[in-house]
């Protein structure tokens, strides 16, 4: 974990003191690929979480009404409709989830200007950690599906209500440009990682022609609140709670209005752990059983397409982390992404993308 600068540490100490946590025991937690850091705070025998997200480390988020040109000028976060680490986005999303009977951390003290938050500590029982210790994964995944099915029956607001004195946070749509920006990470960074030449103009034109109608279909079907990073390392098991509240959610600050398949594919085609095809099928069966009015065939066509787009996006992210930031540990996840893509492109309607991967030197990866 990168040491905090003295100025940053002073800001944190002032915040903690003003919030009544000046004497709390502080336990830094391991970092991830983001600019966000966490510490566990112990006060009077009770545990809390300190979220530390320096706002200056990120480019600006997308604002409602921005044109595509405006978003391109603002930078990647605006193009991809990421929250740019804005801690008030997390607080607003947490409040919305809790208002719907789902489990997100209760937020207690906030300094939005400096990117600091004290919130409820949901514990250490991440789905991924429990499964690694031998707990049966199927009940966990089925509970996660039940939480999504309930969330997907709701019509989310255009603006998530503000919390702790902040204004509301806009729930923007995972639109064509955001999807295009994500998929573009693959064509920009993966060839560099693979050591080959940049893709030709023809390859890029064919890539765009294949994806354009799929992205437009996904934008048109964007009806649900999407956590956007819904997987076994962001879900907590809370067995003392009941029903869908047993699934604790974290890391949802980049939430958008998106196609309901988005969080499903994040969960069932996980970048960091294997989910068997059998479990994926059982989980999808459970989902459609809970939402019998959904056209399964049409939904799955979008699911397969968006899963492939997401995996291409993640491959681009991992390639960039390896090549540009010298973080080789992300290489271990790359074969899994290709296996997912290899399965997805066998689905009806995915023939064009399968042919593209073969035509431009990636065919062997589909069997990785």
Image: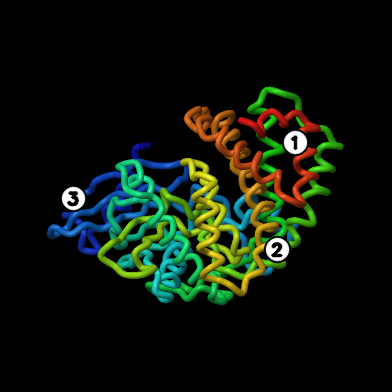
Image quarter hosting the N terminus: top left
Counting residues from the start of the chain, the first of labels 3 and 1 encountered is 3
Q: Residue at x 40, y 57 (%)?
A: 250
> Are the residues at dot 3 and dot 1 in contact (C-beta closer than 8 Å)?
no
Which residue lies under the disc numbered 2?
298
Q: Viewed as shown, does residue 120 lie left or right of 347? A: left
Counting residues from the start of the chain, the first of labels 3 and 2 encountered is 3
Q: CA distance from mark 3 to mark 2?
A: 52 Å
Q: Nearer the viewer, residue 261 or 5?
A: 261
Tell me if residue 232 comes above or below residue 247 in the rendering. Answer: above
Q: Residue at x 58, y 72 (%)?
A: 292
| Occupied quadrant, residue 68 | bottom right
Q: Residue 296's x, y, as percent?
A: 65, 64
Q: Viewed as shown, does residue 132 lie left or right of 367? A: left
Which residue lies under the disc numbered 1?
357
Count of residue discs: 3
Q: Residue at x 72, y 38 (%)?
A: 187
Give the crowd class for mark 1: few <14, some 14-19, many >=20 residues within 10 Å.
some
Q: Residue at x 52, y 48 (%)?
A: 278
Which residue lies under the disc numbered 3?
25
Q: Nearer the viewer, residue 220 or 162?
A: 220
User: Is label 2 in a helix, a strand or a loop?
Assistant: helix
Q: Nearer the viewer, mark 1 or mark 2?
A: 2
Counting residues from the start of the chain, the first of labels 1 and 2 encountered is 2
Q: CA distance from mark 3 to mark 1?
A: 52 Å
Tell me if residue 295 comes above or below residue 38 in the rendering. Answer: below
Q: Residue 196's x, y, as percent?
A: 72, 24
Q: Residue 208's x, y, as percent?
A: 80, 47
Q: CA distance from mark 1 to mark 2?
A: 24 Å
Q: Viewed as shown, does residue 72 lie left or right of 59? A: right
Q: Is residue 73 visible?
A: no
């Amino acid at each position: 974990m990168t040491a905090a600068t003295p100025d940053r540490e002073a800001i944190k100490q002032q915040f903690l003191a003003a919030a009544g946590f000046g004497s709390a025991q502080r336990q830094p937690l391991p970092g991830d690929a983001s600019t966000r850091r966490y510490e566990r705070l112990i006060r009077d025998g009770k545990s809390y979480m300190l979220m530390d997200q320096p706002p200056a480390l990120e480019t600006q988020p997308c604002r409602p009404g921005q044109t595509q040109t405006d978003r391109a000028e603002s930078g990647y976060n605006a193009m991809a409709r990421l929250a740019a680490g804005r801690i008030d986005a997390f607080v607003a999303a947490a409040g919305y989830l809790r208002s719907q009977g789902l489990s997100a951390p209760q937020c207690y003290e906030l300094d939005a200007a400096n990117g600091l938050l004290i919130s409820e500590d949901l514990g250490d029982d991440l789905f991924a950690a429990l499964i690694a210790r031998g707990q049966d994964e199927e009940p966990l995944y089925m509970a996660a599906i039940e939480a999504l099915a309930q969330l997907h029956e709701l019509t989310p607001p255009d603006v998530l209500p503000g919390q702790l004195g902040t204004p509301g946070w806009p729930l923007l749509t995972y639109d064509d440009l955001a999807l295009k920006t994500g998929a573009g990470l693959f064509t920009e960074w993966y060839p560099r990682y693979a050591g080959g030449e940049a893709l030709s103009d023809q390859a890029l034109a064919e890539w765009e022609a294949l994806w354009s109608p799929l992205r437009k279909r996904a934008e048109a079907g964007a009806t649900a609140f999407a956590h956007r990073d819904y997987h076994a390392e962001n879900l907590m098991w809370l067995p003392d709670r009941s029903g869908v509240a047993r699934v604790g959610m974290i890391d949802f600050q980049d939430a958008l209005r998106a196609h309901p398949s988005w969080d499903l594919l994040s969960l069932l085609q996980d970048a960091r752990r294997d989910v068997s095809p059998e479990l994926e099928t059982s989980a999808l069966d459970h989902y459609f059983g809970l939402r019998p009015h959904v056209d399964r065939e049409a939904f799955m066509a979008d699911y397969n397409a968006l899963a492939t787009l997401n995996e291409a996006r993640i491959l681009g992210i991992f390639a960039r982390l390896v090549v540009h930031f010298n973080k080789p540990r992300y290489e271990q996840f790359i074969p899994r992404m290709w296996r997912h893509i290899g399965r997805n492109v066998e689905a009806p309607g995915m023939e064009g993308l399968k042919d593209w991967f073969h035509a431009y030197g990636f065919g062997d990866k589909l069997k990785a």
